[in-house]
Image (cartoon, grey):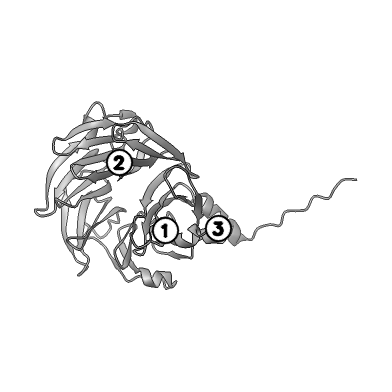
Amino acid sequence: MERAVPLAVPLGQAEVFQALQRLHMTIFSQSVSPCGKFLAAGNNYGQIAIFSLSAALSSEAKEESKKPVVTFQAHDGPVYSMVSTDRHLLSAGDGEVKAWLWVEVLKKGCKELWHRQPPYRTSLEVPEINALLLVPKENSLILAGGDCQLHTMDLETGTFTRALRGHTDYIHCLALRERSPEVLSGGEDGAVRLWDLRTAKEVQTIEVYKHEECSRPHNGRWIGCLATDSDWMVCGGGPALTLWHLRSSTPTTIFPMRAPQKHVTFYQDLILSAGQGCCVNQWQLSGELKAQVPGSSPGLLSLSLNQQPAAPECKVLTAAGNSCRVDVFTNLGYRAFSLSF
């Protein structure tokens, strides 16, 4: 006698839509709360999810602890970049920056505090804002993206005070040299440009793809990620991931990584990078690959190091990209678990 095979219960339309959304989700951006206990993640649907790191890391954590405590619609299009001040979560999408009070967000009162649009050349121009950068000493925010300019906004007044022009194509990434004070920008034109914030002028240009040891023409010339530490810079994208001495504009280490890298950061005596492929790469400054730690996403777009002194128990590395999951690394050796939209 044949056993009866139970029929699958058809999912409702809402469940099917949500499943498809998760299947095709990309997480572009992350930002840790000022208290260090929460993580915001922004996706390609314009949603921001807030995860409780303290709950997920608790010895009593359950599967529900790895789900968002709140999810809200922040932008009509993707949330490309986010940063946090001591009170606000700032998010960027297509042509606009929005501010949310962390206190209200955690109370699930997700009403925007303000939104601003940079002064674009025409009213029809709505370029994506790919990067946000806080300049604490100025109490200002620098944003850059599809209009090839760096716009500076005074966070106290909400006014745009200057625009830095020099790139000839999309800007993908920004980094701050706090001592100087100088900002680096990298973009689709293949150049890393160094800007003096005191004079609002470009003071150095490194066209990475023109250096034979860095060039990889089959990948293009675009610069997708960069980071700085004093007189040193690491950048990558189409060209090879490379460590540079800024004063001499000299490439000192070429990291042997074929896949284009989308995010890079200095951490203690290491460089961490991620991009095409599921792994977080750990590099010695000499160029030696110390470790490749696999995650759950097929490609990674952002890394976030939670180093808030207020929450040492939540000191983790998180990685996100081409999936609905945010991987959590409690130490750099392995993925402990994943948060999920």
Q: In this view, does 334 lie above or below 214?
A: below
Q: Is residue 119 above or below residue 182?
A: below
Discs 3, 1 touching: Cβ within 8 Å: no
Closer-to-camera residue (139/122): 139
Residue in the image at 83% along x and 50% along y: 4
In the picture, which quadrant includes the N terminus?
Answer: top right
Q: Which of pointers 3 and 1 indicates the residue nearer the eye?
A: 1
Mark earlier in primary sequence (3, 1): 3
**How far across and how far down the image is residue 119, in percent?**
21, 60
Residue in the image at 37% along x and 51% along y: 304
In the image, is 306 to the left or to the right of 177? right
Write down the quadrant of residue 205 in the picture: top left
Disc 2 from disc 3: Cα separation: 42 Å
Instruction: Give the numbered dot on residue 18.
Output: 3
Closer-to-camera residue (303/149): 303
Q: Can residue 47 be seen in this view?
A: yes
Q: Name the residue under label 2.
A: 269
Write down the quadrant of residue 275 in the picture: top left
Residue in the image at 13% along x and 41% along y: 204
Q: What's the residue type where badge 1 is placed?
A: Glu
**How far across and how far down the image is residue 324, in percent?**
49, 52
Q: Which of pointers 2 and 3 indicates the residue nearer the eye?
A: 2
Q: Mark 1 points at which residue?
A: 313
Which element is circle 2 on?
Answer: loop
Q: What's the residue type where badge 3 is placed?
A: Gln
Q: What's the residue type where badge 2 is placed?
A: Asp
